[in-house]
Image: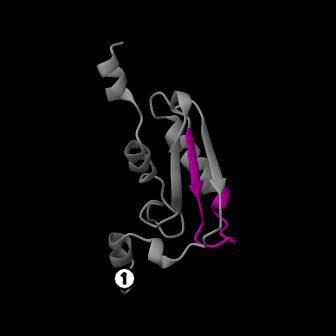
Amino acid sequence: MTEENAKQEALTKDDVIAVLKNVLDPDIHMNIVDLGLIYDVQLGQNNSVHIQMTLTSPACPYGPELIESVKTMLLIVKGVKYVKVDLVFSPPWSQDRMSEEARLELGLDL
């Protein structure tokens, strides 16, 4: 493989975010990126991915399901060997973290 091909195939944070837009919150029926649940994406060696995410509420019953969905979606990306998801609650999630599109779709005041 040439160096140019390796650069073209390298996983980027934008790639990860694009994949995570396919993970929907089962209760709100909106992707977790636009909801503002993804706090950080880090790429490691050998296309390992480390995600810091939160939930809309610490008591959210869908937490384990969302974490598994994140892992499953990222592990099907070509080359990704390992995914670590850390659930964090600081800073706490608020509607301010949502994208403008998400707030409009949910009918929230901007």
Tag 1: residue type? Gly
Which structural element holds mark 1?
A: loop
Q: Is residue 37 left or right of residue 19?
A: right
Answer with the quarter of the image where residue 59 lies: bottom right
Q: Position of residue 47 (x, y in %)?
A: 51, 32
Residue found at x 37% / y 22%: 6
Q: Is residue 53 magenta?
A: yes
Which of the image's four quarters has the C terminus? Answer: bottom left
Number of numbered labels in the structure image: 1
Q: Position of residue 75 (x, y in %)?
A: 53, 36
Front-lying residue, 70 or 54: 54
Front-lying residue, 56 or 92: 92
Give the extent of the magenta segment.
49-64
Q: Is residue 61 magenta?
A: yes
Dot 1 crowding, Cα within 10 Å, few <14, some 14–19, many 20+: few
Task: Identify the colour scheme used.
Answer: one colour
Dot 1 corresponds to which residue? Answer: 107
Q: Is residue 6 left or right of residue 51?
A: left
Rendered position, 13 above or below 93: above
Q: Position of residue 29 (x, y in %)?
A: 46, 66
Q: Is residue 55 left or right of residue 73?
A: right
Q: Position of residue 106 (x, y in %)?
A: 39, 77
Residue found at x 46% / y 34%: 77
Rendered position, 32 above or below 101: above
Quick one: which residue is furthest to the top in this view?
1
Quick one: which residue is furthest to the right in this view?
59
Which of the image's four quarters has the N terminus? Answer: top left
Residue found at x 38% / y 71%: 102
